Image: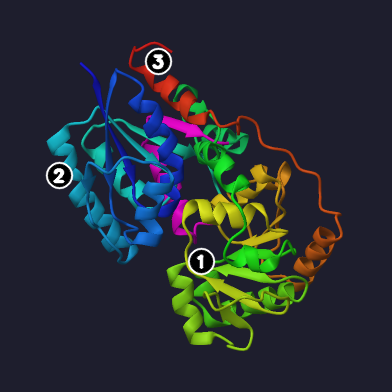
Amino acid sequence: MSKRILSVVGARPNFMKMAPILRELAKCDGFDSRLVHTGQHYDESMSRVFFRDLKMPNPDFNLEVGSGSHAAQTAECMKRFEEVCEQIKPDLVIVAGDVNSTLACSLTATKMQIPVAHVESGLRSFDRTMPEEINRIVTDTVSDFLFTTEESGNRNLRREGIAEEKIHFVGNTMIDSLVDCQRFFCQAPAEGPLAALNGAPYFLATIHRPSNVDDPVQLLRVLEILESASRLAPLFFVTHPRTLQRLTQVRRAEKLVEVTDQVTCIRPGFIYLLPPLPYLDFLRLMSKSTAVLTDSGGIQEETTFLGIPCLTLRENTERPSTVELGSNRIVALENETIATCLDEITHGRWKKHLKPPLWDGAAAQRVVQALRGAYGLGA
């Protein structure tokens, strides 16, 4: 009898991590694979478009949890996922990343005595003010299969007392998605704002973490940094919905320009606002940028793989390989540090960088190989 597997996605970062695993599971006769979408992210730009770009199957179950406080969202997700588990009686639940859906479904499965596999285990920022850090720690504690993306994850899990046989160093499934899509976004002709640039250099920014956008004082500091950068080259600011909402409260209209069909001239000195973009469109914009300014974890990894200089506007990172090996540097909100980095980047003096081990497009294959071996289906 095939082993029943429930794979869980809920928010935008999950889709890129889970899509390659779903494809590999579909190739294996020994697994009956079902997909659960919790609905943590639910609109067109943050969810449905990713299913299209990543060629993901429609979810078998949509919990339609929606937004809410951390506690309310997590609790509602647990309640609705429990009903799915009671109906399907899975042999394994696979979760990915560090969002509230990850925590909720791993806890629910564990309480129901269902084994849990965590994709992207062991990452630690050592900053417990971040909700994601709590989600990572708890999920790793209850998981039976811990699939790591980099060596720091292996070290962290061992230090926390996780049994060695549970730890599987497989690489980065999000990079699998990037590799799979690379031919589409690299070869596509310039269109939209890229066409208006006529090949001129530009910067790209994405800022969404509560520590940077919820406090108007902090958000103004971020805007000052982006304005300074824009004097060197035009800057595209892809805005998460929560960021756009906060910008309406503090925006300085003379420097912020919303990109529409009427915007035909892109020039230095301005920040050009873009809505959340489809996966392929965002990769295309990022891959041709001179540098990226971000507080996103996943973008630190994608820029490292693509060799794009990345400045992380945070005090820490849970992905140290992107700094130690890759093209990333932690700069917080330090204007002088950022100015120095941008000067190095624009004058071709940025640090040399490498791709971390096993970021080769085959991580999902290694995940499924490990599961096949564990369930006696052959390596």
Viewer-proximal residue, 343 or 147? Answer: 343
Question: Which contiguous range is marked in magenta?
Answer: 127-149
Would residue 328 appear left or right of 174 to someone viewing this image? Answer: right
Residue visible at 55% across and 57% down in the picture: 296
Q: Earlier in the sequence, mark 3 or mark 1?
A: 1
Q: Which residue is mark 1?
A: 208
Residue 213: image location, x then y, percent: 52, 73
As drawn, the label of residue 373 is 3
Judging from the image, what secondary structure is the residue with disc 2 in?
Answer: helix
Q: Toward the viewer: 217 or 197?
A: 197
The percent coordinates of residue 268 (x first, y second) are: 73, 76
Task: Determine which residue is flagged by label 2.
Answer: 83
CA gap, disc 3 and disc 1: 40 Å
Which quadrant of the view contains residue 232? bottom right
Residue 312, percent across and down? 65, 59
Q: Residue at x 30, y 49 (%)?
A: 104
Q: Amino acid at mark 1?
A: His
Left or right for 288, reference 121: right
Residue density around tag 2, few if under 14, some if 14–19, many if 20 or more, within 10 Å: few
**Could you say which is closer to the camera, residue 63 or residue 239?**
239
Mark yes or no: residue 313 visible: no
Give yes or no for residue 90 being in the magenta stretch: no
Residue 94 picture location, percent across and down: 35, 36
Q: Quadrant of the C terminus?
A: top left
| Residue drawn at 39 percent across, 22 percent down | 371
In the image, what residue type sits under mark 2? Glu
Are the two marked residues, 3 and 1, in contact with CB atoms closer than 8 angstroms? no
Image quadrant occupied by the N terminus:
top left
Looking at the rendered structure, the kind of residue marked 3 is Gly
Q: Residue furthest left?
A: 87
